[in-house]
Image: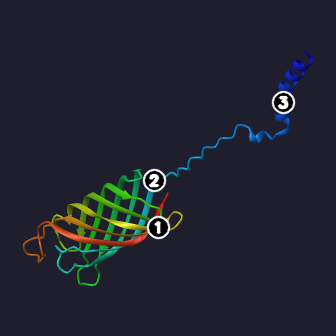
Amino acid sequence: MKGKFLSFAIALSLPVLLSVALPRSSFGQDTTPAAPAVTEFQRYVAYAGVAYSSANQVKGSSSLYGFTGSFDAKLKPWFGASADFGQYENSTTTVTPTVTTFLAGPSFYVPSEKFDGFFHVLFGGAHTGGVGAIPDISFATAVGGGLEYNMRNHFWVRISGDGIYSSFVIGTTASGDSPHLRINPRAGVGISYHF
């Protein structure tokens, strides 16, 4: 009987001795690897840059230079909306033709770590000045896209291009190239900030 009691006492005291002798960190370890950290995508993009555009319907203004700015809000990493504003002019001729665009619409993105691509279809208006177009405001659509390169943290370099569809009617006495729908190219380069 004494031998059974001694065996029972050792069996009960063994877990207590092991819990004191072994470090607590060795108990309850999970051997499954931790899930990789999910980084939140940057929802907003502000862009400013220099741009070239043309207004082929206005005689003498085939090359216009200026600036463009945009703001993008991403609903998903691959889809969002853009608002775009541009101001272009040519002051090297006797007249000073100007074109102002104000556009907004959906954008589609191809995100990666160093490069982001995008494609957009924007709708809005275009205003021309300095050439006597009547009316001087036209419905406009821009179809295009671009590529961005991540320089550092939130700062990216962007190159982009569009075809801007618009139509300004110039009076019969004016010598414009076309009173009908024109597709005017636009190209830009600048800096965007992702946040």
Give me the residue at 76% from left, 41% from top. 25
The answer to whether residue 165 is left or right of residue 48 is left
Which residue sits at x=37%, y=52%? 80
Q: Amino acid at mark 1?
A: Trp
Mark 3, residues whose alpha carbon is within 10 Å: few (<14), some, or many (≥20)?
A: few
The reply, left or right, for residue 159 in relation to residue 101 is: right
Q: Which residue is mark 1?
A: 156
Depth order, front residue of 118/64: 118
Give the image quarter of residue 48.
Answer: bottom left
What residue did someone put label 2 on?
43
Mark 2 or 3: the one toward you: 3
Helix, strand or loop at label 2? It is loop
**In the image, what residue occupies the spot 38% across and 53% down?**
78
Residue 87 picture location, percent across and down: 32, 69
Element assignment for label 3: helix
Give yes or no for contact between labels 2 and 3 (Cβ–Cβ under 8 Å): no
The residue identified by callout 3 is 14
The numbered disc on residue 90 is: none
Label 2 vs 3, first from the N-terminus: 3
Residue 20, visible in the rendered structure: yes
Disc nearer the start of the sequence (2/1):
2
